[in-house]
Image (spheres, rainbow, N blue to C red):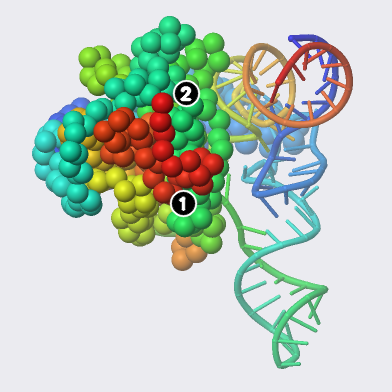
Amino acid sequence: MLDPQLLRSDLKQVATALTKRNMTLDVATIQQLEDKRKAIQVKTEELQALRNSKSKEIGQIKSKGEDAQSVMDEVAAIKSQLDESAKELDEIQHSLNEIVSGIPNIPHTSVPNGSTEDDNEEVRRWGEPKQFDFEAKDHVDLGEALGLIDFETASKITSSRFVVMHGGIAKLHRALIQFMLDMHGNEHGYSEVNVPYLVNAESCFGTGQLPKFEEDLFHIKEHGLYLIPTAEVPVTNTARDEILDSEELPKKYVCHSPCFRSEAGSYGKDTRGMIRQHQFEKVEMVQLVKPETSYTALEELTGHAENILKKLDLPYRVVALCGGDLGFSAAKTYDIEVWLPGQNKYREVSSCSNFESFQARRMKARWRNPETNKPELLHTLNGSGLAVGRTLIAVMENHQDKDGNITIPEPLRPYMNNQTVITR
RNA sequence: GGAGAGGUGGCAGAGUGGUCGAAUGCACUGGUCUUGAAAACCAGCGGUCCUUUAUCGGUCCCGUGGGUUCGAAUCCCACCCUCUCCGCCA
């Protein structure tokens, strides 16, 4: 959520900043509602103040044993006015709220202009795509030839966009998770958390999935809960309605979880293989920081995700998302794209974002600034470190040999009983 | 799932219709005292929103949402959560 003060004082400037997202803000409607809100809120609160003081008066009169009827009649007259005014205020605030909570974050000044992913800006590359002296297979062919990846059974027991993994691939998947958790925990200073995979609506609102993107979520209606689309939701919401001490910051969490996405609207996209699933696993990094440090934290966090790819010897590039490709809550995002020989292109394995105070304002996640001694909004960040399924694909495709075996990257071997290769 | 108890400020804990945003204690902050510290004493000490350049002032907040009332922490209704016992269960 954007700062309501900013919307009041500088609505036009906000509208201009949002054009970077190819978004037009309905300035006239907001301005009109805001003017109305101001007038009615002042009126309502004045009436409330009057009612309160008169009611107190009644108490005083009665305690003296005198007759308070005339004052009571006065308050009764105020009451109907107040009810009407309060109702009107409620309606205006409601519609204003609806509009404001649907406005995306303002892109940081460093965010490139553009409307689609083609306009994203490549920041750097690491590693060289490997030249194979045979025709590289994709993970589907590799996995099925090994007999270790099975989409058919998954669709029998559940539906499309799910997968069953066996043996060496299942172990490789698990090894990746443990390797990532250990790297971030031991080398990068994150503390590991394990959180619920079902969350309530307040949490989804806090991180920005609700109200606008409900269709992307799996919803358990009879319990009013949602399956998490990313650990970002439960982990960031640990700070909801909290005021943290300055000394506890920054808070850095790493969390492994499954992620559930309905993928509504992506029919026909990435239907082959494990690239786009309804359920996948991810190791997520979340940081809660003081505002002045959030952009250095973003660089640092992105670097932490990159380190995983470096250790696994997987070529990648980092792109800065352009305004049009930026997610709803993010002020700035770097995507990390890993090289996939099977597709002959770079594909996203991580998305690292600074949300500034956008999520924090929605969830009232604050810290006490010792300089002012007042609660102030935190800045929140998160990034995949990394998407496990896609990293698995990358390992398979980049480290395959001509016989279709997979060489296990050195750092994963301790997690796989020192196995060096996955064969049929 | 059944039965019972309970949800009040950072914590503990009082408060059952009217000067209660809330006693008291602890914690915390500042001051006095002290060579320093402790103790003692004095003072301060929640959040939200509105108005305002700012102050002042005002609104709202006692689990959440409704209701009754001139007036609700206090009464009524619904829901949520916690604890204890029983049942079921990884």
Between A204 and A91, which is closer to the camera in this rendering? A204
Residue at image coords 68%, 34%: A59
Question: For the residues marked 1 and 2, what is the alpha-carbon distance in whole angstroms?
Answer: 25 Å
Residue A131, position as x, y percentages in the image: 17, 42
Residue A370, position as x, y percentages in the image: 50, 64
Residue at image coords 44%, 19%: A164
Q: Quadrant of residue A107?
A: top left
Is residue A398 visible from the viewing direction of this image?
Answer: yes
Residue A155, position as x, y percentages in the image: 40, 10
- In the displayed structure, A227 sits above or below A360; it is above
Task: Specify the amino acid type for callout 2.
Answer: His
Residue A35, position as x, y percentages in the image: 26, 34
Q: Which mark is residue A166?
A: 2
Left or right for A249, reference A126: right
For the residues bearing labels 1 and 2, Cβ distance under 8 angstroms: no
Task: Specify the amino acid type for callout 1.
Answer: Met
Give a yes or no on whether discs 1 and 2 share a subunit: yes
Residue at image coords 54%, 57%: A248
Circle nearer the N terminus (1, 2): 2
Residue at image coords 47%, 23%: A166
Is disc 1 placed on a helix, strand or loop? helix
